[in-house]
Image (cartoon, rainbow, N blue to C red):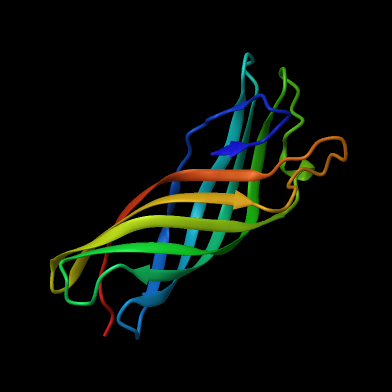
Amino acid sequence: TVIDFVGTNTFKPGVNLGLFYNHSKKERSGIRLELLYSQMGSSFAGTDSQVNLHYIQLPLYGVWYLNDRGNTFRPKLMFGPYVAALVDGSGGINDNSLYTKPNFSGADLGLKGAFGFNYNLNDRMWLNTELYFGQGIVDVLKDLNYKMFNQSYGLNVGLSFPIN
């Protein structure tokens, strides 16, 4: 997960955990709602400085399946907005704790896209995978001299169970 800060930011891995609900009445399309805990942040090139942000995210996707129901392997494309609430923040530049929760906006808003597949393991369980990319569209730093936008990418893997 990356926050753009004057071009010196570097990749910093984080955790992304949660639940999802997928609803599809049509053969090749549906909607998906997720509730996620997401770690975001950045390291800064050439320093030991970093930003650590913790969000509760709520993405809402449109889902397009690339083949029909009944197939064991179902590739999919997903795209939609997300809203996120900041839970905690820490870090700073050169041992200055500039990046604490009060210095950030309490909310983030952005867009997410993903490509993945569902694989039918049996009649009551699916393996779900997605490679995703998220781009914040709101400046999350309250400092008027700098701008920070959340940007994330990663891999989600999980199991789903139909609800009848």
**Which residue appears at 19% of the width and 68% of the height?**
125
Give x and y (percent) for residue 44: 63, 23
Image coordinates of residue 56 in percent, x first then y, are 56, 56
Question: In the rendered image, which quarter is residue 65 located in?
Answer: bottom left
Q: Residue at x 78, y 44 (%)?
A: 102
Q: Nearer the viewer, residue 111 or 1?
A: 111
**The C terminus is located in which quarter?**
bottom left
Question: Which residue is rendered at x = 33% and y = 76% of the image?
Answer: 28
User: Which residue occupies the extreme left position in the image?
Assistant: 122
Give the vertical position of 52 relative to 35 (above or below).
Answer: above
Extreme residue toward the top, this view = 46
- Looking at the image, which residue is at 60% across and 50% down? 135
The image quarter containing residue 4 is top right
Looking at the image, which is closer to me, 126 or 35?
126
Coordinates of residue 129 in the picture (x, y in percent): 31, 55
Tell me: 116 left or right of 152.
left
Which one is in front, 164 or 7? Answer: 7
- Tell me: residue 22, above or below residue 4: below
Query: Would residue 98 appear left or right of 78 to someone viewing this image?
Result: right
Considering depth in this image, is 65 or 33 the residue closer to the camera? 65
* Lateral position of residue 48 relative to residue 26, left or right: right
Q: Residue 32, position in %: x, y?
A: 43, 71
Count of labels shown? 0
